[in-house]
Amino acid sequence: ALAYAEAGADVVLAARTLADVEAVAEEVRSLGRRALALSCDVNDSEQRSALVTQAREQMGRITHLVNNAGGAGPNDPLTLSVERFEEIMRFNVSSAYHLSQLCVPHMREAGSGNIINITSGAARYAQTQFSAYGTAKAALSHMTRLLAQDFAPQVRVNGIAPGPVLTAALNGVLPVAMRDGMIKATPLQSLGEVEDIAAAALYLASPASRWVTGKILEVDGGAESSVWPG
């Protein structure tokens, strides 16, 4: 959001807990841009609809959508319930599908639009204990390619597949040995930072990528080309 604001955009930020986005909204406003912070549980279809309605009414138009919600921990495929598997799919895939449905008519009304889905390297890595999360992110990645065909030419749809990124939350719980192992197995010999993902999102949202759609941009320090996370 800050990268977009620095580039001249007004932004809408949404999270289940309002405090998580209100502080960022204040930073955006300090840059002289408008910011709307809203509470939204993307697992709830009514809240998703209300989010888009409020964004359109209060900001005037919708031209960009970043689907950044998602996640799931490791799972044992023999004990994970079908119900939990479906919850993971809804959180990572269905929410992005519905928000795209809701926003594209407004983007077409505005003359053009851009959707970015934050997927994951887990969509391609073959590793144990990630059958649910990896499957969900693989579905999101391919949905990105398919929607790019459906929504062209007015709306571009791309994805970003982050590799091992050191977020504030991860930094506090990641064991040193695991961190060192991840760094060693990544060709660029470092973990990514959130700014690396923000820069990729800014590129995909800008005129610099005007002829790019249906692509998954891997921002992973070369992990995709290595044997990580073997």
Image (spheres, grey):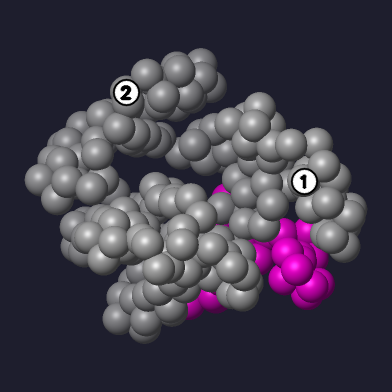
Of residues 99 and 111, the one drawn nearer to the viewer in this rendering: 99
Q: Specify the amino acid type for callout 1.
A: Met
Q: Which residue corresponds to the image point at 62% horizontal and 70% vertical from the top-left?
A: 127
Q: Among all residues in the image, which is located at the extreme left? A: 46
- The residue at which mark 1 appears reads as 178
Q: At numbered mark 2, what does the secondary structure look like: helix, strand or loop?
A: loop
Residue 25 x %, y %: 42, 23
Question: Which of the 4 image quarters holds residue 217?
Answer: bottom right
Question: CA–CA distance between discs 1 and 2?
Answer: 32 Å
Q: Residue 49, percent across and down? A: 14, 47
SS of the residue under disc 1? helix
Asked whether residue 100 is in view, the answer is: no
Question: In the rendered view, does 16 fall on the left or right side of 127?
Answer: left
| Residue 71 in view (yes/no) | yes
Label 1 packing within 10 angstroms: few (<14), some (14-19), many (20+): few
Q: Is residue 136 magenta?
A: no
Which residue is painted at 58% across and 50% down in the image? 202
| Residue 135: image location, x then y, percent | 44, 71
In this rendering, the label closer to the viewer, 1 or 2: 1
In front of the other: 24 or 88: 88
Q: Which segment is the magenta one?
A: 202-230
Crowding near pointer 2: few (<14 within 10 Å), some, many (20+)? Answer: some
Q: Which residue is mark 2?
A: 18
- Three-letter code for the amino acid on which mark 2 is drawn: Leu
Residue drawn at point x = 56 percent, y = 53 percent? 201
Q: Is residue 229 magenta?
A: yes
